Image: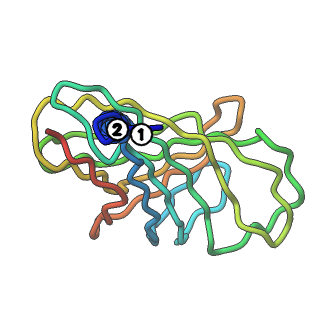
Amino acid sequence: MKTPRRLATITAVAAGLALAVPVAAEAGTVSVTWGCGSIGGPAGTKTFEITVTAPATATAGQTVTVHAGITQVAPAWGGGTEPAGKYTGTVVLDVGGATTGRVDATGLTNPVIEPGTSFRLTGGTGQLTLPAAGPVTLATSSYFLYYSTGTFIIACGGSGAKPVAATIQVS
């Protein structure tokens, strides 16, 4: 039989464990329409959805990992079927608020691409050191696409508003 004192101890320990659980990640998807310049790929205006995932909270001085993925929603893929890993890319994020600068989410690669579907790149990561307390925003800035051989294909970006995809609260 559990005594009231033992129940209070169990409750206090359980509450302490709940505080030790990592805070959920901050994730957001934003839509941007950018002009794209090209060497070897189709140029013009394209619309993308960019998803950024970062820790919701961090402490000053901490280095965090930021994840990014990008989907070209318009125009749809007009080429033939492409194998996974044929393309690589980088999403550039502007860092604002208590910390400023930029973080490059590199290592993006494509899954299999079928005609008429959206072109996607997933798995991008970048490191960001947060030296000061306060909110830190991650805004979409630009995107670069390469063949898996490293040959540059296209760069996209815009001079207008840069939508914030995630915010990290730094204490």
Which residue, given by chain and number where applicable, does mark 2 sit on? 103
- The color scheme shown is rainbow
Which residue, given by chain and number where applicable, does mark 1 sit on? 66
Q: Quadrant of residue 13?
A: top left
Task: Look at the numbered disc 2 and give the secondary structure of its residue.
Answer: strand
Residue 124 locus on image (x, y percent)? 54, 40
Q: Residue at x 72, y 72 (%)?
A: 76
In this picture, residue 141 sits left or right of residue 161: right
In this view, the residue in front, 122 or 87, is 122
Q: Residues within 10 Å of mark 2 (few under 14, many from 20)?
A: many
Disc 1 marks a residue whose amino acid type is Val
In the rendered view, tell whether residue 63 sits above or below residue 57: above
Residue 94 locus on image (x, y percent)? 28, 48
In the rendered view, tell whether residue 99 sits above or below residue 51: above
In this picture, residue 119 sits left or right of residue 140: right
Q: Residue at x 67, y 41 (%)?
A: 109
Q: Earlier in the sequence, mark 1 or mark 2?
A: 1
How many numbered markers are drawn?
2
In the rendered view, tell whether residue 111 sits above or below residue 117: above
Task: Look at the numbered disc 1 and give the secondary structure of its residue.
Answer: strand
Disc 2 marks a residue whose amino acid type is Val
Q: Which image quadrant: the C terminus?
A: top left
Q: Residues within 10 Å of mark 1 (few under 14, many from 20)?
A: many
Q: Label 2 near label 1: C-beta < 8 Å?
A: yes
Q: Residue at x 18, y 41 (%)?
A: 170
In this view, the residue in front, 71 or 63, is 63
Q: Which mark is residue 147?
A: none
Residue 153 locus on image (x, y percent)? 62, 46
User: What is the C-alpha distance between the residues marked 1 and 2?
Assistant: 8 Å
In this view, the residue in front, 80 or 110, is 110
In this view, the residue in front, 5 or 84, is 5
Q: Residue at x 55, y 70 (%)?
A: 46
